[in-house]
Image (cartoon, rainbow, N blue to C red):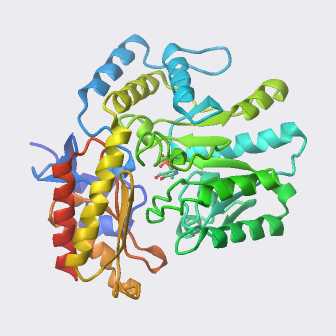
Amino acid sequence: MSKNLAELDQKHFIHPTSSIQQQQQHGPAYIFEKGDGIYLTDTKGDTYIDAMASLWNVNIGHGRSELGEVAKEQMEKLAFSSAFSTFSHEPAILLAEKIASIAPGSLNAVFFTSGGSESNDTAFKLARHYWKLKGEPERRKIISRKKAYHGVAAASTSATGIPQFWDMAGTFMPDFVHAETPYEKSTAEAIESMRQVIEHEGPETIAAFIAEPVQGAGGVIIPPDDYFQAIRNLCDEYGILFIADEIITGFGRTGKMFGMENWNVQPDLMTFAKGVTSGYIPFGGVVVSDAIHDMLKERSTGTLFHGFTYSGHPTASAVALKNIEILEKENLPANAQKMGERLLEGFKKIRNDTQIIGDVRTIGLLGAVELVKDPAANERFPAELGVAGKAIHALYDHGVICRPVTFDNTDIICFAPPLIINEEQIDTIVEKVHDAVVAVE
Ligand code: PLP
């Protein structure tokens, strides 16, 4: 007889970014055991559309045996060996070359990690190391933005612009500051806020600025078209390095291979994780520009005291290579673009047929539907009503998994389905969103 999984879960499994008390009271509501394409099936035998690609990451969809096969092959050949010091191996070398070839412009050298938070912490250390080598060691500060999510390691928690993440353990580090984000703000207002932060902190103390091309966990905040060029100009004006956090937006999610390509803006460092392996195995990294790599080559004498056991993990590297091959072969960035347009059309249509849908937006297959009390006046619901939470539960009841954003008095439903999704499946999601919204309005 199978074990009582829910009971064991409550007893032994501390869930990430979850309410411990809720888990103790109710146990896990869904225990998934199988994935296929855009679908997940739980232990009760119920099937759901995974309209979040789980955690914005299962880009090529669930159940792709090619990735399992390549992992098995690599595990049997060389599951793991070190990449420290003088040791190397083929999968990591080939993956570094591949990522350099698809990353924008002069981003040509890669440092590997095991996930997104490690990637951002690494980017901050590399940026500070760069300035130290350049003879400006006082450049240590990192500017991030409100509503940003950059992860939960020590430094990435501080770069995250959602204060609840700092409060949990008093983990806010010095040398992190947050400027306004272009949510309900124009490019000019957001840039002015950045300029004020830079001037207030002192440009000579700032190492880098970090931004997600599209803020994900903050509520799928798509910037105005002129925003990132203005950011690039501002960084150049003050000599600040620009880090693009492509952890959600990388590997096809926004309709381009990398999010920044939507605005043709070149970052100095780019972090990635999630979609690089479509979640089949933990992995991530930082790609740096030739200028940064050259500085390391010329002046970083002795050991670079930074490296994870799993930096460049052979099995993960082999899986990433196969995943990227699939993304390219099946033209998944282009499919994301096309399906994202259809999703937006669908959202606009159901906005007319319902009472509480406000702004709707997509860029590729990253999308959001805002729920508001009065769409004409953009008047929000009181936070205590928890409207987005209710809508999400109604969606679960209709067989669709997506994610609410409820902080800062917003009710946003986020969407990020696998990039292999087809027209009929997009239409099903839209229909079910309609039904769920009608159920809560
Ligand atoms: N950066 C962004 C934009 C993210 O969305 C995430 C995770 O959701 C992270 C960083 C952190 O990545 P990880 O959870 O792999 O540490």
Q: Residue furthest right?
A: 135
Is 39 situated above or below 143? Answer: above
Point out the residue furthest to the top here: 77
Residue 269 coordinates in the image, percent (x, y):
65, 41
Image coordinates of residue 103 in percent, x first then y, are 55, 34
Of 185 and 138, nearer the camera is 185
Which quarter of the figure is the C terminus placed in?
bottom left
Q: Position of residue 112 (x, y in %)?
A: 57, 32
Image position, residue 309 (x, y; %): 57, 29
The image quadrant that residue 178 belongs to is: bottom right
Left/right placement of residue 184 relative to residue 180 reads left
Question: Which residue is at 41% across, 29% downward?
Answer: 324
Q: Is residue 363 left or right of residue 172?
A: left
Q: Is residue 238 above or below residue 377?
A: above
Position of residue 393 relative to residue 114, above or below, is below
Residue 306 appears in the figure:
yes
Going 19% across and 47% down the picture, which residue do you hit? 39
User: In this figure, what is the number of numbered marks?
Assistant: 0
234 lies left or right of 338: right
Residue nearer the viewer, 216 or 86:
216
Occupied quadrant, residue 327: top left
Does residue 122 appear in this view? no
* Residue under the point 82% across and 43% down: 131
* Viewport quadrant of the N terminus: top left
Which residue shows up at 46% across the image and 58% down it?
A: 216
